[in-house]
Amino acid sequence: MRGPFLFVAPLALLALLVVATRLASAELEDRGDEDRGVVDAGVFPTPAELLARARVELARPTPTRADSANSGRPDGGEGSARLAQVAGWLRQASVLAPRDFGVHLMLAEVLLRQGHPAEAVSAFQRACLFARGPGQVFPCSLRLAEARARDGQYEGALGEYNRHLDIGNRTKEPDLFVRRAEVMMAMGKLVDAESSFATAIALLRRASMPQEHETATLARALFGQAVVMDRDGRDREARQTVWRAIALDPTLSVLEVCDSAVGESTDRVANLPFLPVGEVDYYRGLAQLVLGESRLAMEAFNRFVASGRQSPWRERAEQHLLALAAAGADVPSESARRGTVVAAATLEAHGPLPAPLIDAAWRSRPRLLEPCMAEVPRHVTRVLRLPLLLEIDGKGIPRRVQVQVGAAGDFGLAGDWRVFTTCVEKRVLAGLRTVVPGNMRRTSVRIELVVAIDARP
């Protein structure tokens, strides 16, 4: 009995499968026209259609900040949503056409505009694999270099720039020497950066009738050379070079473009405005310092320091900030101030840093907190005792600052003081520096400041 049963069972299963297949085929025949209509309607677009759709969307004007505010959206909300939609189309196209240079290149550009440089690097790398001819290979490699630099991959970016200059005609690409120098400087290679800037300047000055973009590139190279000199402690040379740059670009428009544009064109090097992350704030700070715009210079250097990037030039920027503060660059007008710090005393210091050194640091910065005095609540009309807790590291730099709201009876409701206390904490973090005799471990400090309040309404 077992033998015939084993023979009949597969036949029965095969018959059932045939019947099911015929039923499915009949159903598909009945829906054939409908399915063809769906395909024709573009539910399954081709890579070329997706790429064209992305190009059209990217060509539409991007809403301004004012437009975003008027529409009730947060800044860049609509633009961000559009970029995300375009990125989705291009990712779909890259799956359907994995060897398409144009698809990968445009996806990389969109990712860069979205602020995703690491993903952009991967997309540029895929694009460059399928680049054909100098018209695709060189622009793609250049954009890969800039994406690497935006992601902090300075060694990789420098390698791409060097490859360009080794292969290409050096006399025709001073822009590349400028970009290479900027990356070198961000890496701390001052000597190499100055040499690369000097080469770019020499090439640009040979042009008998420089075009507009060449003049802009020369100004940018001079700004960069000035920053090299400043960071090397050659203040006088730096100022003279800044003035030469300003003579070419009085409105600092080169720095504005570098600050605001990611750069999307790949047909000419000059259409790729770019500086390593945060560097443009240092450039602008130095330029404003030379122009005598102390408050603007302080704002720019503060942005550089506050960017969080581990730059080898952070300490130099802090030196500029201390000098500007000592000169009163950030002091508001008398009419705006509601109080003055008249005394500062270290009450406790747990750690190797002695209290006299901490007190000396406060005495060296008598105007440190004056920009915050306009934020003292209006109902306060008497002397204010301001308790602070600090953590100071082994180099004399505050790493944590806390105003003790509620620790004394001088404070009213915490909400009344939020703007003032936040200002105090930020100012102390950015500006208080204690001279220490060598590296030490951290010191916990409790300080009390006495603020004389102006009782005038």
Image (cartoon, rainbow, N blue to C red):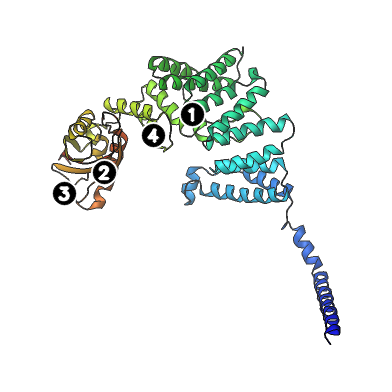
Q: Which residue is mark 1?
A: 187
x%, y% of residue 41? 74, 58
In the figure, 127 relative to 29: above or below? above
Residue at left offset 44%, top offset 17%: 243
Position of 120 with respect to 247 (left or right) is right
Q: Is residue 438 at least partly visible in the picture? A: yes
Q: Quadrant of residue 20?
A: bottom right
Position of 135 with respect to 346 (left or right) is right
Image quadrant where one finds the N terminus: bottom right
Q: Amino acid at mark 2?
A: Phe
Label 3–label 4 contact, CB within 8 A: no
x%, y% of residue 165? 63, 23
Q: CA distance from mark 3 to mark 2?
A: 16 Å
In the figure, 107 relative to 188: above or below? below
Q: CA distance from mark 1 to mark 4?
A: 16 Å
Image quadrant where one finds the C terminus: top left
* Mark 3 or mark 2, earlier in chain: 3
- Which of the two marks, 3 or 2, is nearer to us in this view? 3
Element class at badge 2:
helix
Q: Which residue is mark 4?
A: 305
Task: Estimate how packed mark 4 is, as few (under 14), some (14 to 19) or many (20 or more) residues with alpha carbons within 10 Å.
Answer: many
